[in-house]
Amino acid sequence: RLEFVGRADEQVKVRGFRIEPGEIETVLSGHPAVDRALVIADQGQRLVAYVGPKADAHTGELGEELRQFAGGQLPDFMIPSSFVVLGEFPLTVNGKVDRAALPAPVFDSGSALAPRNPTEEILCGLFADVLGVPEVGVEDSFFNLGGHSLLATRVISRVRSAFGVELGVRALFEAPTVAGLARVVAGAGQARVALEPMARPERLPLSFAQNRLWFLSRLEGPSATYNIPLAVRLTGPLDQEALREALSDVAARHESLRTVISDQDGMPYQQVRAGGAARPALMVTEITEAELGNALDSAVRHAFNLGQDIPVHAELLVLSAEDSVLVLVIHHISADGWSLEPLWRDVATAYAARLRGAAPGWRPLPVQYADYTLWQRDRLAQSLEPQLDYWKRTLAGLPERMELPTDRPYPAVATHRGETLDFHWDAELHQGLVELAHAGNATVFMVVHAALVALLHRMGAGEDIAIGSPIAGRTDEALDDLVGFFVNTLVLRTDVSGDPTFHELLDRVREVDLGAYAHQEVPFEHLVETLNPERTLAHHPLFQTMLAWQNAADSELTLSGLSSAVTLPVHTGTARMDLVFGLTESLTGGLDGLVEFNTDVFERSTVEALTARLGRLLAAAVAEPERPVSELDLLDERERELVVSGWNDTVREVPGLSL
C-alpha cells in the first residue's frame, strides 16, 4: 500500500529541521472536521496551516483543536505556529491553490516570547545567529530548534565574548532556553583571558595536535592518510588566472596555509612562509569525463612533505570550456573539517574581487593559528590541571583495545589502507530519533552514540566501551573564521553493565558526553602522553572506533559568474582507525552516513552488516526505549531465519545399527 504524503522538492527547513509539509497535511486531514489542509512555511521559518472545514463542522475553536490534535501525533517542531480556517481556498485558472492569494497568517505572540531585559535580548540574538533562524523566544529550547553539541560550543564561546563570563557546555544542556541561560549568566564567574595576538618567539611551537601528526609523518613518511580533500565541479566560464590569484589571496590571509614544519635537533617548529614560496600552485590538466575518476583519486592522494611543501595542493581538471573540477587538498596539520566553510567563503570572495581586477577587501582576521598555539600552551600550563585530573579518573583502567570481532588479525604495523561505505536513514527514523532525544533531554548524537555502544556490546566488545568523538575545539569566538587544526578528540567511555534499558543507557551516555564536553580543552595528544598507554603501531591509542556528527551546510557553494558549484564525493583510500561513523543531516530528509573502515581487519560485507544492524537497533529503540538493550532486534529476516531454523536444523538420519 502506497500513501502519497508530498513531494521531496517541497521540503522546507524550519528552525534547523527539514520538514515535509505533506506529512503534516496528512495528519490534519485526519481530523473529523477537516476537509482539506495545506501547510506552508512563512518566509521559510514558521509553519502555517490553512484548513478547509467540512460543511457541518463548528469552526469557532477549530484552530486550537487542530493544534492539540497535531500535538498528539507530531513532534513539537512539526506543529504549525498558525492555523488559518478558510471558507474556500483561492484557486488559479488551472484549478490549483493560488498560494499568493492566501490570507496572511496571524501568529500567537506567546509562541515566541520577547526578551524582557538586555541579557535576554543579547542571548536571543546570539541563539538566532548560531542556529540560523530569524528569531528565538525566551522560552524556546536551543536543542528543539536544531541545536547540537557542536553549535553549543559556539554559543558558549559567544556568551564568553558578550558577557565576560565563563560557562561550560553543560550549562546550556541544563538551561537550554534564553530565560534559563540568562539566570545562569547572572551568577557565572569571570571569563578566562580571551585569545588575542601573542608576542612570537624566535621559533613558533606546534600545537599538541600538530605535534602528533608531525611525529607520525616522520615515522611513516609522506602519505594521504591525513589529507582533507574538497572537490568542486564548476559549470560556467572559469577565469583560471583569477582563480590562481584568489588562491594566493587566501593563503596570504591564513598563515596556516603557508606554514611548513621545520625542525632543529629533532624539535619541530612552525615556519610561516612569505612571498612566492607562499603561493599555492594551480596545476591545470585537460581530461575527459572517462578519466575524471582516476584523476580525482590521484589528486586527493597527493603526499605532502611537511618540511618542504606548504600544506595546500590545488588542481584544476578541465573537461571543457565551461566544465571543470577544482580539487583542493589540505593536510590535516593545517586545517580541519570546520575549516572548509571559511576556506571556500574566502576563495569565493577573493575570486569575485579578482574578476573585477581588485584585491579582496575583507576585514583582517583577529588572530592567526600561531597565536592559538602559544595561547593553548599558556592555558594548559595555567589552568587545565583540573580538567586533566578528570580524564585521569575517567579513563583509569581502560582496556588497551576494544575486542571487536574482526575478519583478520591486526598486522604488526597498520597500513592505514581503507574504504568507505555510504548509508542513509530515512526521515521517519530521523524524526523518531529527534523525539527520543527530546524525551531524554539529550541530542540526536547522544541517541546514536548510545545505539553504537549497545551494538558494539552486543557484537562482543564487552561492557567497557570507549568511542572517540571529534569536537570543534574552537572555544574562542576569534577562531570561528580561521583555517587551522583546532579539532580535539574526546574519549567517551560508557559502562554497559547490568543490561540497561535503552533509555537507561541513554542517560548514562548523556552524562558521559556532558562530562567530556565540560573537559574538552585537554588536547587528546597531551592526554595520551599523560596516560601513556602501551604504544603500538597496530592500532589507534585509547579507542579504535569513532563517531562524528557533521554540521550540514545550509547553503550551496557558489563562485561568481558560474551557474553552479557542486561538491563531488572523494576519498583518499585511507583509514585512520578501525571504524569511523560520520553522520550528516540530509538535504532531502533523514540522515546521511559514511563509514570509513580499516581494510587491514574488515571486509566490506562485515561493515555493511554492522551498519544495517545499527539502523535496526535504532528503529527498535525508537519503538521500545524501555526494552533492555540485550533484547533490541538486530537481525534482518534472512539472518533471523538462519538463527531460528538454519542453525537448528540438526536432524540427521541415524543408521539402524545395534550398539
Image: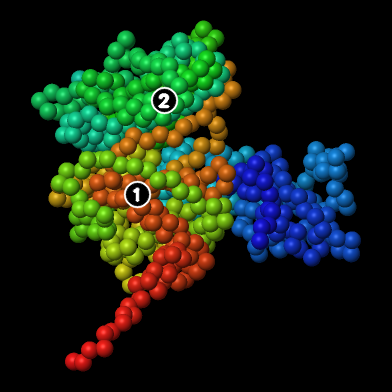
Nearer to us: label 1 or label 2: 2
In terms of sequence position, does the residue under pointer 1 or pointer 2 come before the other? 2
Looking at this rendering, what residue extends furthest in the left direction?
265
Q: Quadrant of residue 327?
A: top left
Disc 2 target residue: 291
SS category of the residue bearing label 1: helix
Which amino acid lies under the numbered mark 1 shown in the image of this protein?
A: Arg
Tell me the residue at 71%/42% (across/down): 42
In the image, residue 467 sits, relative to residue 14, either above or below, namely below
Q: Position of residue 571 (x, y in %)?
A: 37, 36
Residue 530 in the figure: left or right of residue 560? left
Give the CA distance from mark 1 to mark 2: 26 Å
> Which mark is drawn over residue 284?
none
Which residue does the image show at 61% across and 43% down from the upper left? 13
> Which quadrant is home to the C terminus?
bottom left
Q: Residue at x 72, y 54 (%)?
A: 25
The foreground one among 448 and 105 is: 448
Looking at the picture, does residue 613 appear above or below residue 646? above
What residue appears at the point 44 percent right and 26 percent down from the top-left corner?
Answer: 290
- Local SS, label 2: helix
Name the residue tied to disc 1.
604
Q: Give the left or right position of residue 343, taking residue 108 as reference.
A: left
Q: Is residue 659 above or below residue 382?
A: below
Taking the image as drawn, is residue 379 in sight?
no
In x, y percent, where is residue 611? 40, 54
Residue 33 spot, x, y in % from top left: 81, 63
